[in-house]
């Protein structure tokens, strides 16, 4: 459920007309709803009511906006970060260092030192080599890094190849068969304290089966590690729960997911950690855009909007679907191709789509753009970086200024030898 709905024939974000935001901030612009973010955060937590000891860490990469992070911090969420930049954002938003988990295969020594100095809660180590580096860095600082070992369970998440992370040939984690040996060797090192294992098999999962398969393997591994004499206090189950990009898609609910987790982890006797991203932020944001013009096509007309692949990369990157709706629908429908102004054929949001009829100058939205939207924006085609707005009841604020092409150009220099 979200708070972007028609009121007297016009789309609102909570109690703010989207047309007002377009007028005052310009387009394209991402619009987030605080009430929706909070609702999703609460529903996800409630779904996990059957999991006694848990820790929720919002996956910052899905939406790193400071105001969004502040909203989620207010709902008791920690953060899952994948870079020093994300770590600093989480801290700046008021998330306690000990509630932050650091994931990713490429943590550098500098990032490790920075995170340790800030008192980060946990590193999710993705290789033996990384574990050795972390141990050395922490020991040199006179510290002990808390860590889990990320396991690659070799399970097909059944999602888009580019967001699958749990197959043996993906770069993430270490294989089940080598996990115990690596765990054993890293446990001998000063500077690192291994306290459990982590898993994250992919994003936009529309079935619980792959999760159940992965969690089952993790449960067996935890038992095996304990038999080897290791103390396991934490198991991180990652994120990945899908969202309905189209009304017909019915992803498992947080309640179904929570019931599965409660069932499979019942005897684990550990803090169960979660890293949800998309399921919290996805439907809490829309990308508001204006139609520049309608260009006739061979078959269907092209609706050229002022948002493009540099603002919302998912369709170009993953052939992703985003529902398109007019801000003031007139009740009629048209079949059209929806495209942006960028000079690439990949800058296409939809082909032959049945949509609200729109004409030049009309406002429209792409739905479910709150996750993996603004965070992937670039200035390709020197278009500037898209602005972001947070709505709260009948008020809103610009929570990320538009960065103009001129500002981006100002960061460049031409050497005096040219
Ligand atoms: C991307 C990612 C997440 C979040 O995934 P969602 O599908 O957005 O829930 C969680 N954990 C890790 C390690 C990730 O890379």
Image: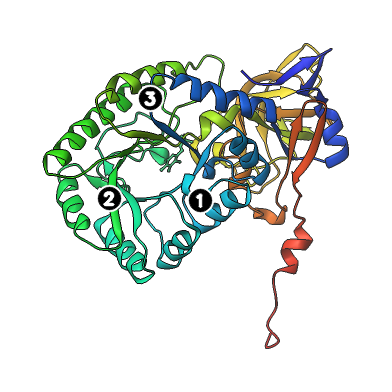
The quarter of the displayed image where residue 130 is located: bottom left
Q: Is residue 202 left or right of residue 384?
A: left
Circles 2 and 1, Cβ within 8 Å, touching? The answer is: no
How far across and down, in percent of the image, does residue 45 sit? 49, 25
Q: Residues within 10 Å of mark 1 (few under 14, many from 20)?
A: many
How far across and down, in percent of the image, does residue 200 sit? 36, 38
Kindly identify the residue that appears in the image at 36 percent across and 54 percent down: 105
How far across and down, in percent of the image, does residue 359 sit? 81, 26
Q: Quadrant of ligand 1?
A: top left
Q: For this rendering, which residue is in front, 235 or 1?
A: 235
For this orientation, the residue located farthest to the bottom is 417
Which comes before the other along the chain, label 1 or label 3?
3
Q: Is residue 257 above or below residue 412?
A: above
Tell me the quadrant of the picture where the C terminus can be found. bottom right
Which comes before the other along the chain, label 2 or label 1?
1
Tell me the quadrant of the picture where the N terminus can be found. top right
Q: For this rendering, which residue is in front, 369 or 273?
A: 273
| Disc 2 within 8 angstroms of ligand 1 (CB) | no
| Disc 1 within 8 angstroms of ligand 1 (CB) | no
Kindly identify the residue that appears in the image at 62 percent across and 33 percent down: 369
Mark number, residue 52: 3
Q: Which residue is mark 2?
A: 194
Which comes before the other along the chain, label 2 or label 3?
3
Tag 2's secondary structure? strand
Tag 1's secondary structure? helix
Mark number, residue 97: 1
Asked if residue 322 shows in the view, the reply is no
As measured in the structure, the alpha-carbon distance from the residue carrying label 1 to the one carrying label 3 is: 23 Å
């Amino acid at each position: 459920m979200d708070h972007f709905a028609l009121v007297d024939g016009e789309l609102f974000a909570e109690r703010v007309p989207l047309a007002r935001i377009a007028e005052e901030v310009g387009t394209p612009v991402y619009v987030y709803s605080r009430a929706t973010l909070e609702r999703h955060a609460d529903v996800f937590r409630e779904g996990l009511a059957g999991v006694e000891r848990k820790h929720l860490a919002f996956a910052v990469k899905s939406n790193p906006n400071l105001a969004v992070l502040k909203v989620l911090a207010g709902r008791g969420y920690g953060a899952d970060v994948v870079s020093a930049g994300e770590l600093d954002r989480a801290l700046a938003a008021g998330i306690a260092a000990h509630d932050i988990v650091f994931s990713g295969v490429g943590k550098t020594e500098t990032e490790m030192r920075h995170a340790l100095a800030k008192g980060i809660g946990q590193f999710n180590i993705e290789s033996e080599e990384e574990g050795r580096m972390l141990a050395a860095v922490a020991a040199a600082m006179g510290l002990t890094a808390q860590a889990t070992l990320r396991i690659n369970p070799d399970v097909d998440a059944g999602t888009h190849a580019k967001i699958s992370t749990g197959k043996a040939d993906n770069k993430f984690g270490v294989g089940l068969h080598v996990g115990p040996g690596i765990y054993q060797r890293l446990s001998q090192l000063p500077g690192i304290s291994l306290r459990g294992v982590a898993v994250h098999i992919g994003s936009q999962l529309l079935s619980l089966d792959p999760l159940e398969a992965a969690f089952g393997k993790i449960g067996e591994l935890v038992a095996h590690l304990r038999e080897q004499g290791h103390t396991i206090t934490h198991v991180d189950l990652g994120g990945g729960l899908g969202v309905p990009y189209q009304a017909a898609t019915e992803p498992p609910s947080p309640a179904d997911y929570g019931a599965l987790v409660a069932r499979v982890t019942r005897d684990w006797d550990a803090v169960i950690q979660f890293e949800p991203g998309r399921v919290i932020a996805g439907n809490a944001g829309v990308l508001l855009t204006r139609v520049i013009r309608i260009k006739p096509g061979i078959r269907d007309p092209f609706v050229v909007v002022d948002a493009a692949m540099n603002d919302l990369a998912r369709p170009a990157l993953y052939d992703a679907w985003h529902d398109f709706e007019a801000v003031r629908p007139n009740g009629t429908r048209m079949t059209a191709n929806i495209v942006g102004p960028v000079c690439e054929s990949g800058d296409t949001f939809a082909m032959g789509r049945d949509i609200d009829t729109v004409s030049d100058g009309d406002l429209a939205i792409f739905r479910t753009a709150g996750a993996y939207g603004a965070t992937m924006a670039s200035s390709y085609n020197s278009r500037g970086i898209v602005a972001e707005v947070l709505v709260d009841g009948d008020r809103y604020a610009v929570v990320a200024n538009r960065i103009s092409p001129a500002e981006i150009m100002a960061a460049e220099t031409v050497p005096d030898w040219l």
